[in-house]
Image (cartoon, rainbow, N blue to C red):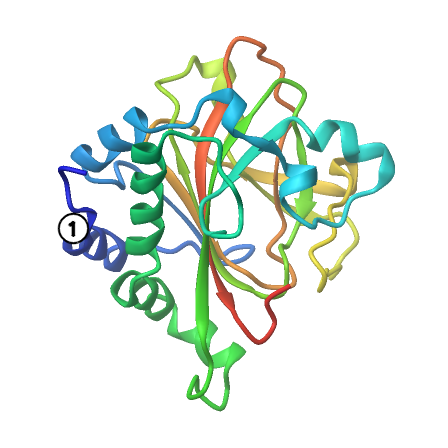
Amino acid sequence: MDVELREFIPELVYKIKNIKLNYFPYVHCEVPDFLPKTLLKLIEKNFPEDKEFIPLTKANSVSLKKEDMETYSNRKCLNIYDDTVSHQMDEKKLAFWKQFQHIFNSLEIVTSFLTNHPQYMNSRYPNGTSGVSFSTRSQVISDKTNYALGPHTDNPGKLFTLLIYLNDAMEDEESNIGTSVYTPITKNFICKRGTHHKHEEFIKMYTSSFQKNNIFGFYRTDNSFHGVEKITNASKARKLIQYSIWDNQTFK
């Protein structure tokens, strides 16, 4: 590979450390133009072909009801963090994604995200983080027509999740396919397990703009309900990268 991706770390750290956080109903953020332009072009060049993905229902252990399996199978994933997976991909492309995983797993990037919200870290680790080990997962994702993601809080092993959107500019009527923030209709309802719930049981508060190089991120809590409204446009796949930071002690 001609470009060493570590050279992008200082610019990424600058961007991360200057993220403005929103605190209601849980801590989340939306930031435009997140990735350096050269890195974004490399991602587009190396984006997997359709045949190189596998369905979410096979790639992850998610808490789904039987009647939801068909809908969730419309999300295709490439788990680039998993060295045990045999990827059907060109070696140069795979090398790029492994290097991408490596820089986002770097101490500089992980520390930048976790120290951006010290109240969260102090609440989750009142005795400090000495002896706690963290790891990251990066997934390349392609969502198809009829995909929808019910409101959920995420696996309790997660600390932080970042979604990097990769689509070209979309028409106004299509821009509602970004990640949505929800609050439960039942007052004070929380979810410790990250189970996927029905949309009709929640109120949609806000939807991030699904535009190229826009990001949506949040810190995982028992009320960090987020999801995706049903995709109805058959002409486009919803392309993104999902990056998450995990506590290895509760990694599930």
The quarter in which the N terminus is drawn is: top left
Question: In which quarter of the view is residue 54 placed?
Answer: top right
Q: Nearer the viewer, residue 167 or 43?
A: 43
Front position in the image: 95 or 166: 95
Q: Is residue 188 above or below residue 4?
A: below
Residue 122 appears in the figure: yes
* 132 sits left or right of 231 in the view: left
Q: Nearer the viewer, residue 193 or 204?
A: 193
Residue lying at 69% horizontally and 56% vertically, measured from the top left: 194
Please provide percent x and percent y for residue 160.
47, 59
Residue 95 screen position, x and y as percent: 31, 41
Quadrant of the frame with the C terminus: bottom right
Image position, residue 189 (x, y; %): 75, 59
Residue 176 appearing in the image: no
To which residue does mark 1 refer? 11
Q: Residue furthest top?
A: 235
**What residue is drawn where x is 41% and y is 16%?**
170
